[in-house]
Image (spheres, helix red, strand yellow):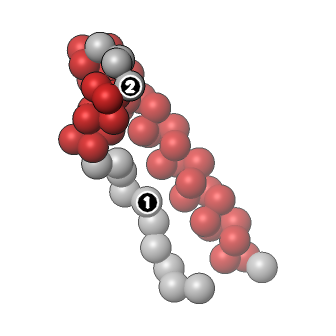
Amino acid sequence: MAPGAVLGWDMGAALAMAQALGIDALIAAELLPEIEAVMVRKLNEEMEGGRDG
């Protein structure tokens, strides 16, 4: 498997999805960076674990 890493989300797309779901843009803008940080870290941990085997 080729090495790689998740660097982050497309926040424009994430905010557009929040708007489409009826989520207040200010709330989404406040919460998304924290959610993104956790998800990026977990995805990279999973991908790293897959390289060990």
Name the residue at 65% across, 59% down.
46
Kindly state the secondary structure of the residue where label 1 is placed.
Answer: loop
Name the residue at 48% across, 48% down.
40
The image position of residue 16, as x and y in percent, is: 26, 35
Determine which quarter of the picture holds residue 47. Answer: bottom right
**Which of these two is toward me, 19 or 35?**
19
The image position of residue 39, as x and y in percent, is: 52, 43
Q: Is residue 45 left or right of residue 50?
A: left
- In the image, residue 5 above or below residue 45: below
- In the image, residue 50 above or below residue 35: below
**Which of these two is toward me, 21 or 29?**
21
Residue 30 in view in this figure: no
* Crowd band around label 1 with a 10 angstrom C-alpha radius: few (<14), some (14–19), many (20+): few
Could you give the CA–CA distance between mark 2 and mark 1, rounded to whole angstroms? 25 Å
Q: Which mark is residue 24?
A: none
Q: Is residue 32 left or right of residue 53?
A: left
Q: Which mark is residue 6?
A: 1
Q: Is residue 27 left or right of residue 4?
A: left
Amino acid on which the number 2 mark rests in the picture: Leu
Residue 29 in view in this figure: yes
Kindly state the secondary structure of the residue where label 2 is placed.
Answer: loop
Determine which quarter of the picture holds residue 1. Answer: bottom right
**Which of these two is toward me, 21 or 48?**
21
* Crowd band around label 2 with a 10 angstrom C-alpha radius: few (<14), some (14–19), many (20+): few
Disc 2: which residue = 21
The image position of residue 22, as x and y in percent, is: 34, 18
- In the image, residue 36 above or below residue 8: above
Amino acid on which the number 1 mark rests in the picture: Val
- Looking at this view, name the residue that lies furthest to the bottom: 1
Nearer-N-terminus badge (2/1):
1
